[in-house]
Image: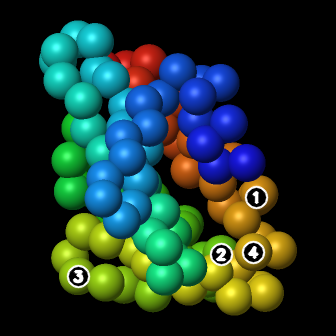
């Protein structure tokens, strides 16, 4: 699900040795940024540091993601979800939200 939806929206999947990341290409800025990670220990992470949005918007996005009730803060820029039964049930909604937000950011940048 995660990979297919990302590919359908023309995001890049990067495979590391033990995880994968989902990256967006910002055409105006001619760079890529990573916004999500999948980890083999059963975690999904959203990474907010490199988003080209004002701090206030970044904080608002963080709050909206935290409101789903599956994330915990894992440092200043990372939200981590342990993929237990509750998180797995919520993931279609959560991931759609993440991709919708990234679609808006990519269109602006």
Task: Tell me how far mark 2 sits from mark 4, CA to CA.
Answer: 12 Å
**Which residue does the numbered mark 3 point to in the structure image?**
75
Q: Is residue 12 left or right of residue 74?
A: right
Dot 2 lies on which element? loop
**Which residue does the numbered mark 1 point to in the structure image?**
93
Task: Tell me how far mark 3 sits from mark 2, CA to CA.
Answer: 18 Å
Q: Position of residue 19 (x, y in %)?
A: 39, 61
| Residue 58 shows in the view | no
Residue drawn at x 77%, y 86% as measured from the top left: 86
Q: Nearer the viewer, mark 2 or mark 4?
A: 4
Mark earlier in primary sequence (2, 4) = 2
Mark earlier in primary sequence (3, 4) = 3
Residue 82 vs residue 20, the one in the foreground? 20
Mark earlier in primary sequence (2, 1) = 2
Task: Say if 98 sits above or below 102 in the image.
Answer: below
Task: Say if 104 sits above or below 15 in the image.
Answer: above
Task: Tell me how far mark 3 sits from mark 4, CA to CA.
Answer: 22 Å
Q: Quadrant of residue 62?
A: bottom left
Mark 4: few, some, or many residues within 10 Å (few <14, many ≥20)? some
Residue drawn at x 17%, y 18% as measured from the top left: 29
**Which residue does the numbered mark 2 point to in the structure image?**
68
Mark 2: few, some, or many residues within 10 Å (few <14, many ≥20)? few
Q: Quadrant of residue 108?
A: top left
Q: Nearer the viewer, mark 4 or mark 1?
A: 4
**Which residue does the numbered mark 4 point to in the structure image?**
88
Dot 3 lies on which element? loop
């Amino acid at each position: 699900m995660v990979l297919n939806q990302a590919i359908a929206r023309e995001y890049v999947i990067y495979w590391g040795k033990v995880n994968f990341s989902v990256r967006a290409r910002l055409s105006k800025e001619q760079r890529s940024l990573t916004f999500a990670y999948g980890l083999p220990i059963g975690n999904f992470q959203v990474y907010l540091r490199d988003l080209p949005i004002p701090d206030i918007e970044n904080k608002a996005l963080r709050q909206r993601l935290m409101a789903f009730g599956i994330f915990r803060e894992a440092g200043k820029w990372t939200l981590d979800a342990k993929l237990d039964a509750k998180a797995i049930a919520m993931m279609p909604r959560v991931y759609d939200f993440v991709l919708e937000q990234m679609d808006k950011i990519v269109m602006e940048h």
